[in-house]
Amino acid sequence: MMHMTFYWGKKVTILIDSWKTDSWMSYLLSLLACLVVAAFYQYLNNRRILLKLVTGDRRRSTEEIRIPFLMGAGGNKRRLGVKLAEAVLFGLNSGIGYLLMLAIMSFNGGVLVAVVVGLTIGYFLFRDEGECDATVVDSSCACA
């Protein structure tokens, strides 16, 4: 049975039916896995931001904005490679973010705490002090 309110306990199903915990050891290992994946999510997010900052998020010309599909046809291969790398990192980061959200939707308090602590640890370890998040906001999508 799936819980519809937050509960505290060692019996939880996380993401798939075969990932069930029934002992304290399996529960703690599952929480550790959630914590590590959440920290890795922050690491990937930071790599994506650094890639954007290092490559220099140049402003597009007005011609490129008007006809974006035609401008990319004969474009620079390096720029295409960087854009592809950004897209892959974004997709991977989004997928992990949604999986973390689904893990929290198991409504187990320990899973929620593990994910939040993992995100906090990842933010502390992988975010650079000189990095300004305001310069990277390029999308109003909450998952970005």
Image: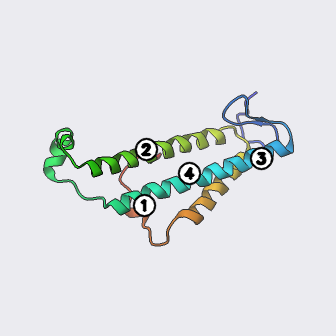
Mark 1 or mark 4, earlier in chain: 4
Q: Which residue is mark 3?
A: 29
Tag nearer the camera, 2 or 4: 2
Q: Which residue is mark 2?
A: 88
Count how many numbered circles sit on residues in the image.
4
Q: Which mark is residue 50?
A: 1
Gap between marks 1 and 4 measured at Cα:
14 Å
Quarter of the figure that contains the N terminus: top right
Mark 4 or mark 3, earlier in chain: 3
Q: Amino acid at mark 2?
A: Val
Residue 95, position as x, y percentages in the image: 52, 40
Gap between marks 4 and 3 measured at Cα:
18 Å
> For the point 84% across and 36% down, which residue is it?
22
Q: Is residue 92 above or below residue 17?
A: below
Q: Are marks 2 and 1 in contact (CB under 8 Å)?
A: no
Q: Which residue is mark 4?
A: 41
| Dot 3: element | helix
Q: Hey, which residue is sitting farthest right in the picture?
A: 23
Gap between marks 1 and 3 measured at Cα:
31 Å
Does residue 9 appear in this view? no
Residue 34, position as x, y percentages in the image: 68, 47
Q: Badge 2: few (under 14), some or many (20 or more) residues near its Cα, within 10 Å?
A: few
Q: Are marks 3 and 2 in contact (CB under 8 Å)?
A: no
Q: Badge 4: few (under 14), some or many (20 or more) residues near its Cα, within 10 Å?
A: many
Q: Are marks 1 and 4 in contact (CB under 8 Å)?
A: no
